[in-house]
Amino acid sequence: MNCKEHHLPELELATGQVREALQTALHTILFIRSPGPVAPRDVHCEGFDLTYTRIETPDGQRSWSQQAAGGGVGGVGGGVQQQIALESDLDRRVDDAIENFLRSLTQIGPELLSGCLTLSFFERRASKQLFGLMNHEERVVWEQWIIRVVVNNTPRPVGEDSASVIERQRMQDTAERLLKSALLKVFEITGGDIDHVPPVMFEFDISCSKRADDRENFTSRVANMPALINLGN
């Protein structure tokens, strides 16, 4: 099975925006890729003017093991018995992955950090080795979502002078525009071909990855970013 890679538009975020932005992107993908029936819950972001839909997990403990016969969320189904087996502590897995991501960030310039988060969907396949004498289970990844992030660690201006207000609004508008662009890309991809989605139990994993070209790509992108307003002290 060939693994499909989806690269979302790069996010440029202030330090305080990273957690909520990544929660928004990850939970949106996990909801759409669940072959459900799962209960949806709309979440309005505190730091962004947008609402996203995620899987409802009462008390954070609802099991994500679901059986689906027929249609499901994201168009998966077609009368085939399907199951997605994901840990019940969905919020913990997402939040832990984001914390690991924050600890893995690489400095690419003054007050600038970069990182890459990968959401992988995979299935487990049993096979026999040594002339059928030994059972072996392999993990087959069939889809990956790659989210690149530049984190601006510059202190957020707090003054009420015009320069501070303008800079705060610029940072907010940039982050919100890029997050919305990433979500639109998710909807575009998931609304397309789903032939690669297996009609069997599958799981997910979230990891931090560092690629050889990350520093070069991020440095090039940062060099073209608009200069910050020098607010002074």
Image (cartoon, grey):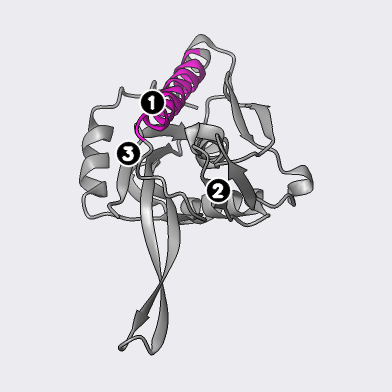
Mark 3 — residue?
7
Q: Which is the main secondary structure of the residues drawn in magenta?
A: helix
Residue annotated with mark 1:
188
164 on left or right of 213 = right
Instruction: Please determine whether, in this image, residue 176 is positioned above or below residue 19.
Output: above
Of tags 3 and 1, the one toward the viewer is: 1
Mark sitting on residue 44: none
Examine the rendered structure and indicate whether residue 142 appears above or below residue 109.
below
Residue 233, how many percent across, how many down?
50, 27
Depth-wise, is mark 2 or mark 1 nearer the camera?
A: 2
Q: Could you tell me which residue is drawn at 42 percent across and 39 percent down?
A: 151
Residue 58: image quadrant is top right
Residue at the spot x=39%, y=40% of the render?
Answer: 149
Q: Residue furthest front?
A: 79
The residue at the point 38 percent across, 90 percent down is 133
Q: Quadrant of the N terminus?
A: bottom left
> Crowdedness of circle 3 by 10 Å Cα count: few (<14), some, many (20+)?
some
Q: Circle 1 sits in a helix, a strand or a loop, which is it?
A: helix
Residue at the extreme top of the image, as rendered: 162
Amino acid found under the numbered disc labelled 1: Glu
Name the amino acid, label 3.
Answer: His
Instruction: Point out the tag, 3 or 1, that comes first from the N-terminus.
Output: 3
x, y percent for residue 80: 51, 45
Asked whether disc 3 touches disc 2, contact meaning CB atoms under 8 Å apart, the reply is: no
183 part of magenta stretch: yes
Let me know if residue 179 is in the magenta part.
yes
* Crowding near the residue tagged with mark 1, few <14, some 14–19, many ≥20 C-alpha atoms within 10 Å: few
- Whichever of callouts 3 and 2 sits on the residue coming sooner in the sequence is 3
Q: Which residue is mark 2?
A: 81
Question: Which residues, given as a range, are shown in magenta?
Answer: 166-193
